[in-house]
Each structure stands twice: as structure tokens, then as C-alpha cells.
Amino acid sequence: MIKLVNQLKDYFDPPQDGPVTYEYYVRTGKCNQCGKCCSGIYLIHGEEVISSVPQFEDLKKRHEDYRHFLPIEETEQGIKFRCKHLQEDKSCGIYDDRPMFCKKYPSETTLLMGGSLAPQCGFSFKAKYSFTEMLDKAAEKKKLNPGKLLNDVKPA
Ligand code: SF4
Ligand code: SF4
């Protein structure tokens, strides 16, 4: 029971340094406040990268978390954003009140959604299983609950 409570606590409010154990990966390292995850980033809604400004403007009306971001560039992969709270010195202007997805970042969800960490990021992930074991586990999860693998992964 204590283990479960600790796992839930790590999920919703992970420590800023020290290892965090997820389902498939273990995260180590700490934030060096490079700011690379707050600017020049793609945002994912559902399973898709936000790919147009009109789509983003529509999402902003329905989901207030998107209101933190400003579109800065259109690329072949989608729209790149920066957070309007990112300060000149790369710190977060609303650190104590930053959204939950910022408190949880980076989690293994980033990797499972096909994302990656910035090269400058102070965190790193180590897989708990071999590649074959990961495929087996993913297949098993899909078999038990078709379509759930991606649907239960929320954007980081
Ligand atoms: S709210 Fe803070 S931590 Fe979150 S993206 Fe913006 S600047 Fe970064
Ligand atoms: S990219 Fe990594 S090290 Fe840089 S601010 Fe984000 S979490 Fe911290």
C-alpha cells in the first residue's frame, strides 16, 4: 500500500532529482533549467501533434492549459510553440503554479508518445526491459485492452 501511495505521489508530483520508476523506464538526473522543454516544442493533443494555428486557436477555447503557449513557427512536423511564462534567464515565471504537465515533465509518456528529451536536458531514461520484452508487454497490454496503449497516455 505504501509503495502504491509513493508511486502515485511520484506520478503526480515527481521529485526534481533522484530516480523515478515508471512502468517501462527509470528516470534519473535533475533539471538544469536550460528551458529547452519550454520553447521550440511541439504540443500533442490526443495522439496528434498540433499542426495548424486555427486548430490551436480552437483547442485554446476548450482547454485552458493551451493558453500558456504561443505559436512561433510552422514546420513540416507541426507548429512549434514557446511558453509565455519562460523568462529571459530560462526560469519559469509561474514555477509554484505551473501546470501539472510541467510538474510531471519529463515522464516516460514523452518517450512512449514518440518524443525525446532535448540534448541539453539533465534527465535521462533507462529502459527496465529489453526491446523484445517491451514489445511483448505492449502487445499484451493491447490484447487485454485494445487501443488503450496510446489512449491512456496523455501529453507530457
Ligand atoms: S509553465 Fe513554466 S515550466 Fe511550464 S512550459 Fe511554461 S515556463 Fe516551462
Ligand atoms: S529540458 Fe530538461 S533540464 Fe532543461 S528545463 Fe526542461 S526538464 Fe529541465
Image: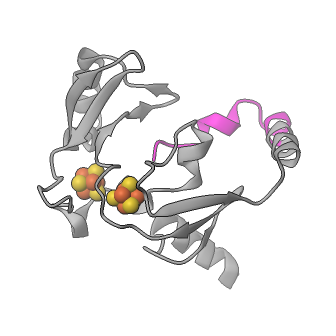
Q: What residue appears at the point 16 percent right and 52 percent down from the top-left corner?
A: 85
Figure colour scheme: one colour
Q: Is residue 59 above or below residue 132?
A: above
Question: Observer-nearest residue: 142 or 22?
Answer: 22
**Can residue 100 be seen by looking at this rendering?**
no
Residue 89, quarter of the rendered image: bottom left
Q: How many marks?
A: 0
Q: What residue appears at the point 67 percent right and 75 percent down from the top-left corner?
A: 4
Question: Observer-nearest residue: 68 or 124?
Answer: 124
Q: Is 33 on the left-hand or right-hand side of 46?
A: left
Which residue of the protein is positioned furthest toward the left in this rendering?
88
Q: Is 105 one of the magenta-colored residues? A: no
Q: Is residue 15 above or below residue 104?
A: below
Residue 131 percent across, percent down from the top left: 82, 45
Q: Is 77 on the left-hand or right-hand side of 35?
A: right
Q: Ligand 1: which quarter?
A: bottom left
Residue 27, quarter of the rendered image: bottom right
Residue 151 percent across, percent down from the top left: 60, 35
**Can residue 26 be seen by looking at this rendering?**
yes
Which residue of the protein is positioned furthest toward the bottom in this rendering?
2
Residue 31, quarter of the rendered image: bottom left
Q: Is 155 one of the magenta-colored residues? A: yes
Q: What stretch is highlighted in magenta?
A: 141-156
Residue 14 percent across, percent down from the top left: 48, 70
Q: For the N terminus, which image quadrant?
A: bottom right
Q: What residue appears at the point 67 percent right and 60 percent down from the top-left corner?
A: 126
Question: Observer-nearest residue: 99 or 122?
Answer: 122
